[in-house]
Each structure stands twice: as structure tokens, then as C-alpha cells.
């Protein structure tokens, strides 16, 4: 008789998948808001829309993203509990550009060979990101891909939904000449540009070189600096919107494309953003990568965040109040420029 070929012998261990779900249940529950209905393990995540009951015209805002090739560094280093924060950050910071409060999040994990411990470490990071953003992790998927992916390989993507009241939405149409640009610092390179980063700072380097403490990184290693999670700006922005309604006109999440190709997305067609170079601190790890790649200033500004993870376009009348509010929150914000008449471009001086 022919030998039986089971799902497990084909490379998919459903029992290990069940163990992984059991391992993350308590982690996931820590993210639950009051609107969450039920528990993980069902066919769909349930979330009450009661969060919008007091809004005049609630608008649902959705966003999806991944972590990209930064995962290769995490896999090489065996550090799996921070990339989940990156995943959440990339999604919630994007929908924040409309002023939306993130409500819930779902993740998708594709792995070559599933192990409960590694999956739990990744989801621990996702849950931590959700807690930082104030949203609930209500579902996800772990997909095992034997024969398609290497056993130690994995990829992550995520999806979030938020809500904003239409009269309070942030919109480039609100921007006026004379508005002030306020930059919120990044924690490092965040999650963009890592194909370039790996080429100049990772490939061909020994783990000893990458993990050696560096004085110019305040004792951190290059690998630690490269794996620093993306900052989540939800609490800062939503706090300003509640305390100083109307002060923020629009905002730009500085992701792939750097300042040059993201700040213009927060502008109307008749206004330019004039950014004052040198008005915020330069991060050593970003300067190290730019020097290693021999990048021109123009190319660097359209590749990396250059130390600013979010730029707020704020009414000039409210700029001092916004800066004071951010200082009270412990935020090291900087006025980095202003808006001028133009054609929707970003200029530097």
C-alpha cells in the first residue's frame, strides 16, 4: 500500500499552530479595549462601533503595511520581539495623518516553519505596538509555507482601522501660508530604506562587528541601532487634537521617500513647505548610513526620515501652545520650518 501523506508530513504542523495560538492568547487580551467582543480563535474579530456614537459624522479610516527587509536583520540577529512594534507603527502612523484614532488591528504572519515560541515573540511585539497606539489586536493569521519559504524565514503584514469625526479631520486643504512645521523626532531609521541599509551596513559584516558597542551610539551596537523600533505618535497627536482643537492642520508621516516625498502629501497645491536644515538634531545611525552609502544631501532627504518621524503643519497662532503641550508630554519637538506660497513642493534652506 502507498504510504500515507499527512498535512504534518507535508510540512504543516497544525498542532504547533494550536500551541502558538494558546501561547499568544494572554498577550493579545492585554490590548483589548472595552469595544472588543469575544476572544481570539473565531473566524472573525468583533469590535463594537460604540466608539463613534458621540461623533457628528464618523469616518472609518483603514491602513495596511509591512515591515519590509528590516526583517532580515531581525532574523539574522534572532531578535523577534520588536518588529511587531514596527508593523503596528507603520499602519497606525499612516491613518493618524487624517486625525483618526486607531481602534483595532489584525496581523498576518507567513513563516517557513512555525514554532510557537518564535510566533509568540513576534506577536508580543505586535501587542506592545497596539498598547502604545491604544488599539486592540482582535485577530490575525499564521500561515506556514514549507517549500516556499526557508524554515527560519518569515514575513509580516498588518491592517488597522480607526475612526475620526469628519469636522475634525486633518486635511491638506486646511493648510495656509505662514503655518509652522513642527517635527517630532524619530527613534532611528524606522522601517524604510533597509534594502540600502543592508547593502552598506550589514552585508559582508561579521556579527562581531555588528554587535560591538559603539561610543558614537552611546554604547549601543550598530545592530541594536538598526533594529530600534519605529516610534508610534498616536498619543501625542490625539492629545493635541483634544486639547487644542483645530491647531493641527495636517501632518506627514515620514516613511519611504523621506521628508521630500512625504511632506508634500500634507500640502495643498498652492502652498510649499520650507524646511530649515539643521533645525533638529541629526541621528548618528542615519548619518553613519548616509556616509557609508556616500549619499548626497538631496538623495538622503528623499530616502530616510533624517531624524524626524512625523511633521505637523500647525496654525501659527497655536504653534507655541502646541510646542508647550508636547514639552509637557516629554516630547523633544522642534520647529523645523514654515509654509510659503508655492505649488505644493518641499524646499530646503
Image (cartoon, rainbow, N blue to C red):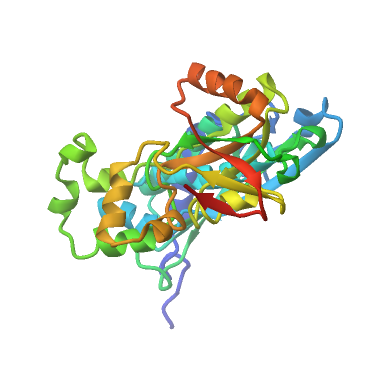
Of 52 and 317, which appears nearest the observer? 317
Q: Which residue is rendered at x = 78% and y = 29% of the image?
A: 50
Task: Indicate left or right for 225 with 237 as reference.
Answer: left
Q: In the image as oriented, which residue stretches furthest toward the right?
A: 56
Q: Is residue 309 visible?
A: yes
Residue 118 position, x and y percent, is 37, 48
Residue shown at the point (42%, 45%) measured from the top left = 122
Asked if residue 78 can be seen in this view, the reply is no
As drawn, which residue projects farthest toward the top?
A: 328
Q: In this picture, is 5 found above or below 188?
A: below
Q: Residue at x 54, y 23 (%)?
A: 323
User: Looking at the image, how many numbered discs can be counted on the residues?
Assistant: 0
Picture coordinates of residue 274, whole percent (x, y): 55, 45
Q: Residue at x 49, y 20 (%)?
A: 327
Horizontally, residue 298 falls left or right of residue 240, namely left
Q: Quadrant of residue 52?
A: top right
Q: Position of residue 243 (x, y in %)?
A: 66, 19
Quadrant showing the N terminus: bottom left
Nearest the eye: 104 or 101: 101
Coordinates of residue 196 in the picture (x, y in percent): 35, 63
Amino acid at each position: 500500500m502507498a504510504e500515507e501523506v499527512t498535512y504534518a508530513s507535508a510540512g504543516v504542523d497544525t498542532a504547533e499552530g494550536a500551541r502558538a495560538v494558546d501561547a499568544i492568547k494572554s498577550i493579545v487580551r492585554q490590548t483589548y479595549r472595552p469595544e472588543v467582543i469575544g476572544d481570539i480563535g473565531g473566524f472573525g474579530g468583533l469590535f463594537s462601533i460604540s466608539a463613534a456614537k458621540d461623533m457628528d459624522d464618523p469616518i472609518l479610516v483603514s491602513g495596511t503595511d509591512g515591515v519590509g527587509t528590516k526583517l532580515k536583520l531581525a532574523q539574522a540577529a534572532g531578535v523577534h520581539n520588536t518588529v511587531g512594534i514596527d508593523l503596528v507603527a507603520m499602519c497606525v502612523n499612516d491613518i493618524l495623518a487624517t486625525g483618526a484614532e486607531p481602534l483595532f488591528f489584525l496581523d498576518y504572519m507567513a513563516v517557513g516553519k512555525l514554532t510557537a515560541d518564535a510566533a509568540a515573540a513576534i506577536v508580543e511585539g505586535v501587542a506592545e505596538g497596539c498598547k502604545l497606539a491604544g488599539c486592540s489586536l482582535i485577530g490575525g493569521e499564521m500561515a506556514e509555507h514549507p517549500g516556499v519559504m526557508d524554515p527560519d524565514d518569515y514575513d509580516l503584514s498588518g491592517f488597522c482601522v480607526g475612526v475620526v469625526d469628519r469636522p475634525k479631520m486633518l486635511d491638506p486643504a486646511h493648510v495656509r501660508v505662514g503655518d509652522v512645521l513642527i517635527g517630532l523626532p524619530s527613534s532611528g531609521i524606522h522601517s524604510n530604506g533597509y534594502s540600502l541599509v543592508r547593502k552598506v551596513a550589514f552585508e559582508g559584516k561579521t556579527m562581531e562587528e555588528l554587535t560591538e558597542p559603539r561610543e558614537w551610539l552611546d554604547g549601543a551596537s550598530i545592530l541594536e541601532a538598526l533594529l530600534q523600533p519605529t516610534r508610534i505618535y498616536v498619543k501625542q497627536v490625539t492629545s493635541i487634537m483634544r486639547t487644542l482643537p483645530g491647531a493641527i492642520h495636517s501632518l506627514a508621516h515620514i516613511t519611504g521617500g523621506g521628508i521630500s516625498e512625504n511632506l508634500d502629501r500634507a500640502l495643498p497645491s498652492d502652498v510649499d513647505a520650507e524646511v530649515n536644515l539643521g533645525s533638529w538634531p541629526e541621528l548618528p545611525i542615519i548619518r553613519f548610513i548616509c556616509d557609508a552609502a556616500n549619499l548626497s544631501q538631496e538623495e538622503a532627504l528623499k530616502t530616510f526620515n533624517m531624524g524626524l518621524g512625523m511633521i505637523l503643519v500647525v496654525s501659527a497662532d497655536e504653534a507655541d501652545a502646541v510646542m508647550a503641550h508636547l514639552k509637557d508630554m516629554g516630547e523633544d519637538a522642534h520647529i523645523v520650518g514654515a509654509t510659503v506660497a508655492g505649488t505644493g513642493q518641499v524646499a530646503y534652506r
